[in-house]
Image (cartoon, rainbow, N blue to C red):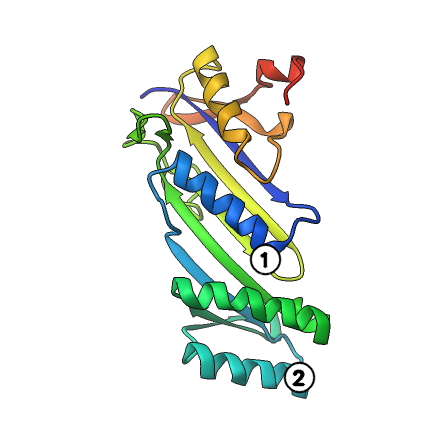
Amino acid sequence: MKPFIGYHFFHGTGRIDRAKAYTKVQQAMEIFSNQKSPSHLSLMLEMRDDRTEPLESLCQKLCKTLGPVAHTTTTPTWPDYRAYSWNLNAEQFQELFLLLDSLDQQDSSLTGRMHLGASWFFKFVEPTTGQVLPDQENLPVIDFRLGPGSSLNFSTGKKTSANAWFLFPFEDPSSEFEDYALRFQKQLIFKFSPEHWRLWRFSSGEWRPRRFVPPWYDKKVE
């Protein structure tokens, strides 16, 4: 089983406009992944224990626009908690950016209840050829919540974030890896952190990570 390089971190995206942030993420995935459009689009509305009229009105509006709730989340440790989720198509997803912008002006507390999400589950490709990089078929499941291979989860509402789980099919931090990672970096809405790189090797019957800092952090990277 070949070693590989992993990067996992939850990134905020600063003050960039939410729609522009999504467009940037979409473009990066189009260039560097074999998943040219998101694998899944969704909306979650947190109701919690609040049954005030503005929130209930928003929920009714969403049901009218998006259809019945696809899933309700509850928790035994918080009896009054509930969250409604909808699966979205691309048109609905884009329209909800406009709704979030409108709520920013009308009632920002409602914006904080909404979480618009896009997920990619993908393999890395070489942008110059469009070919999938080798040795990604049998990458292990390190975290069952994220599944096999690489993923990127974009979420926006009151705040915008990206949860990166990248498995690069390089056996060591070679110059080829550095070139690829830095080209990818230029397309992303966040900067790779030196603290979150791992070299994964299979040893004694299990995958074991070793923290490392890529050599480019010793250089001036634009």
The picture places residue 115, in percent across and down from the top left corner, at 57, 63
Residue 218 has which mark? none
- Could you tell me residue 134's position as x and y percent? 29, 24
> What residue did someone put label 1 on?
156
- The x, y position of residue 17, in whole percent, is 64, 53
Relative to residue 187, is residue 144 depicted above or below?
A: below
From what the image shows, is residue 173 above or below residue 155? above
Residue 7 horizontal side relative to residue 40, left or right: right
The residue under the point 54% across, 30% down is: 185
Residue 88 in percent (x, y) is at 41, 66
- Residue type at numbered disc 2: Pro
From the viewer's side, name the closer residue of 144 and 60: 60
At 31% across and 26% down in the image, what residue appears? Answer: 129
Number of other residues with Cα within 10 Å of mark 1, as a class: few under 14, some 14 to 19, many 20 or more: many
Q: Is residue 76 visible?
A: no
Q: Is residue 114 left or right of residue 208?
A: right
Q: Earlier in the sequence, mark 2 or mark 1?
A: 2
Amino acid type at circle 1 is: Thr
- Residue shown at 60%/15% (left/top)? 216
Q: Which residue is mark 2?
A: 54
The answer to whether 149 is drawn above or below residue 101 in the figure is: above
Front-lying residue, 202 or 28 = 28
**Kind of element beneath mark 2:** helix
Dividing the picture into quadrants, the one containing residue 122 is: top left
Look at the image and tell me whether residue 22 can be seen: yes
- Residue at x 61%, y 38% (from the top left corner): 190
